[in-house]
Image: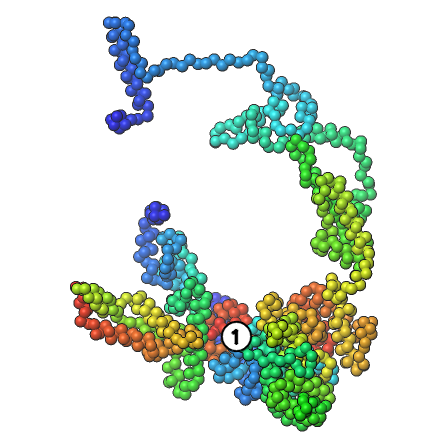
Amino acid sequence: MSLFIRNYKPGSVYNAQIIWRYHSNKVDMAKKEEEEEFRVLDILKTRTRLQKKVARRTDIQPDRSEKMKTDQNWGNVWPGPRSFHPSSVPLPMRQGYVPKGQAPPGKKANAELMKVPNFLHLTPPVIKMQCEAIKKFCTPWPELLNNEEAIEKNYPVEIITSDYCHASPTIRNPLSRIATLRIKLSDLKLDKHARDKFLRLVGDKYNESTDLVTITADRCPIRKQNLDYVNYLLTACYYESWNVEDWEKDKTLEDMEYYDFDQNPSKANLVSWFMRVSKKGDLSDEEIKVFDINNIPHGPEYKKAVSDLFNNSESDQTLQDYDAAVRKLLGLPEKKVAQ
Amino acid sequence: MNNIRIALREVIPNRLRTTSRNQWPNLTQTRFYARATSFPDYFQNPIFRKEDQAKLIENNELSKLAAIPVKPPAACETSSVYYDPLVNKVINHVMKMGNKQLARSLVEKAFENIKRKQIERYHLASTPEEKAKILLNPKDVLHRAVENCKPLLQLLPIKRGGITYQVPGPITEKRSLFLAVKWLLDASNDKERTVHFPEQFAWELLDAANNTGKVVKRKQDLHRQCEANRAYAHYRWQ
Amino acid sequence: MFTRNLRVFFRRYSQTCTFRTSELSPAQHSENQIGMFYTIDKNLCKQLFGHGGLPKSYMKQTKTFTETTLMVRLPALDIMNCIKNTDFDKPVVRYVLYGEKGSGKSLTMAHLLHYAHEQEFLIVHVPWVSEWLRRVPRHKEMANSPTREGFVDLPLDAAAWLLHFKTQNQTLLKNPDLKISKEYTWSKRESTAEGAPLLELVELGIARVKYACDVIDALVYEIKLLSNNKRCKTFVAIDGFNTFFYPLTRLRTPTKRTVAPEEVSLTTSFLTLTKNDWTNGVVVVTADQLAVPEDHQESYLPKYLLYKKGFEHLDPFVPIEVGRYSEREFLTCASYYRDRLWLRGPSELEDELKFTSACNPYKFMELCAPL
């Protein structure tokens, strides 16, 4: 055995067998002549295997795809979304990953082809035909609405919905129910109070940089309901913002959404300072409220600087403006700048 | 892991390794990595001092190093003007639990104390000769203090005939530096609780720089002991 | 080559440029002296800043340098220029110094105090408001105010401040014009008569610590009145003014109730002093990040630090920024440090220090320390 292993080479066993048989045959022949009856033991049992003949049924039709005419109406063959079926598609398709150098498997019994969505029902002629069919329900686009501005002006409310097109057995996608309403705040007719209240009601749905109010609804199962809801929200917010409740009179300075110089103590400071400078008596609160700042030299500049400081947040620039305004107001020399 | 290392070693051309080994380490300020780093050992230590780099350029050795991978320098290894390897060493000795920031601030505060004291002394000194004697730079003070604290000999315990003898012997440069810094820190940690470390350390450094104080005495004690045990010296080789 | 020449030139410049000015009177300082150091007389320094006024780290520095020097900087000059051009019949002008941590607000204040002292202003200087409201040593003397309901007194702090006030205005208080307008009765036996000198009031406050807070209150009232009547000019300087407006102090009453700054009697006194309902005076306050806890240190700008309340209290004020060192100031400062042996070593050091300290004066000083 060890000898065998040492000299082993692939294929050598086969050769050895042949030699062995060759030798044994020779012995056979010699023995045949002497006594015919002796059967040789065929150790290796190399029987020639009979090739089975595959029986083919004769009554099977050729594949349907092979019988299709080239000028057939494809829309009739594949009318709606459906997963891939090899016999209905007369195309020599191949799909799948194989080692390099081999061809991808064909279309029959090919899961790769079946699992991807296809758009075989949406060929250009079919779409064209369907468009033709629904054309009779459409009205022509109004001629005057020929540019974006005109559209925006006449139809300020913009509704955004999405339709989904895919090859699943159902044509409904849950995402298509979502409805978004967009409107520019400046298109709504609101006064100062109403605008403030509207913004507080709307909250973060208002984008300051684009001036757009965006209301999105996805709570109802159907698009129609969501659309109704969105419209309802806009209407409700709009009319609610025009209402003035009793408790709104309690709004204090801290609740203000912006800094109003005329209502803040800064104005009182300024006015009382001015009265002291001009050697007049002190004013009551009411008188201070109605006092016109334009009477004070450099008063309006100062007002602007203070309002900027509060409204545009404190920064080096606003502070500098404030500094300059105060110096002008107080009659001090201008700020020294390093050479 | 070992296999990989062997494999990597085979990858490097022999020529590169020999050149780098022969010419590099003695020439430049190198980084000592105490622990195993994640870098393979054919990575060279970084050269981060501008003087060293200038030297390399002068000797035209820069091009040889261009293709060799280099370890990154540590955060404390900078080309700053006030980088000092000895100061870095002392900071590392002061450091506990890897809190280098604290260690550095302590050492720097000690330097500040030294500086204030020395400047005051300088202003108090009346003659220019006295003024010239005063070391104003705290780093100079540190260098001199460490120099003064370095022992020249050490005692090694050697067992002969069941008795352990303290045998005097020579000391390596590295060990004597280690002992000097260690003694300085031992001395400054041996203090009242109310005294802060930077203050005490500053005093110790100033004392040691003047060749007085606990640490210098400790060094001299060691030397005296070595002198006394001179008779055992032959045990070192017998 | 060109850059090297430039660098050499700048180094020469840095070595030769003078960093000291012989002009010792702040009133004479002008733009030409910007960035230069001037020395304050030792006795004067003791008088003005003996009880606080200079930052602790700076005091240490003066001890090491054996002199007290201040750099002439633009913000101080700016305020002096404004004071020179102020019409003193108008209500007082308030100046707010602001700037990053360590940029030299307190030292600018010190410079201005020196100026005020020279111009014979009556100085009302609070060295550091947080010392009263935010620093709580183990034994902080606190008492409920006997005269005003719901207020808290800090008698020891008040007495210490009165002493500070007295030393700062030693010479001025001897002026017989400074008299009290009405009689104050402290208790059955103690009272200060009408027409008594102001000094008597101050000394009473120092001697009878119990009444120190009320004395300060009276003092503030009298000072305002005297200034209005042109008996004296007053210079009010309050460092760390924004502490008055931080919603809480670290003080606690014996019943463990936290105290708001409005409930401290000292606060009310000094807030009335910073209003602009009196004339013939100057008010300089600082808004400092260090005066409030860390949760309110996001910005160093005055409106943020003073809150809306403080802003409206001071409005209209002149904001004055104390910035980092300019190129020239940095160079003179570096050469001053070199002169004082504080900075040593090669001159490349300065470039490095300029980058690492970002020209922040305090950082620069700190970074120089271990070199």
Q: Quadrant of residue B167?
A: bottom left
Question: Residue A44's x, y, as percent?
Answer: 32, 17
Asked whether residue C213 appears in the rendered view, the answer is yes
Residue shown at the point (71%, 30%) measured from the top left: A127
Return the residue at label 1.
C331
Res. C172 visible in picture: no
**Quadrant, the C terminus of chain A:** bottom right
- Residue A272 in the image: x percent, y percent? 77, 77
Picture coordinates of residue C165 (x, y %)?
Answer: 61, 86
In this figure, what is the number of numbered marks? 1
Mark 1 nearby-residue class (10 Å; few <14, some 14–19, many ≥20): many
Q: Quadrant of residue A71?
A: top right
Work out whether A60 lies above or below C125. Answer: above
Q: Which residue does the image show at 50% across and 79% down from the upper left?
A: C61
Viewer-proximal residue, A163 or A35?
Answer: A35
For residue A286, side relative to residue B131 (left or right): right
**x then y, percent, for residue C136:** 56, 76
To which chain does the residue with label 1 belong? Answer: C
Q: Nearer the viewer, residue B69 or B179?
A: B179
Residue B196 relative to residue C54: left or right: left
Q: Please, is residue C199 above or below residue C259 in the view?
A: below
User: For the residue labelled by badge 1, is the local secondary structure a helix, a strand or a loop?
Assistant: helix
Considering every residue shown, the one lying at the far bottom of the view is C176
- Please name the colour scheme applied to the rendered image: rainbow
Query: Which residue type does callout 1 highlight?
Result: Leu
Residue for point 38% across, 14% down: A48
Q: Residue at x 61, y 28 (%)?
A: A84
Classify the position of the N terminus of chain A by image quarter.
top left
Residue furthest out toward the front? C255
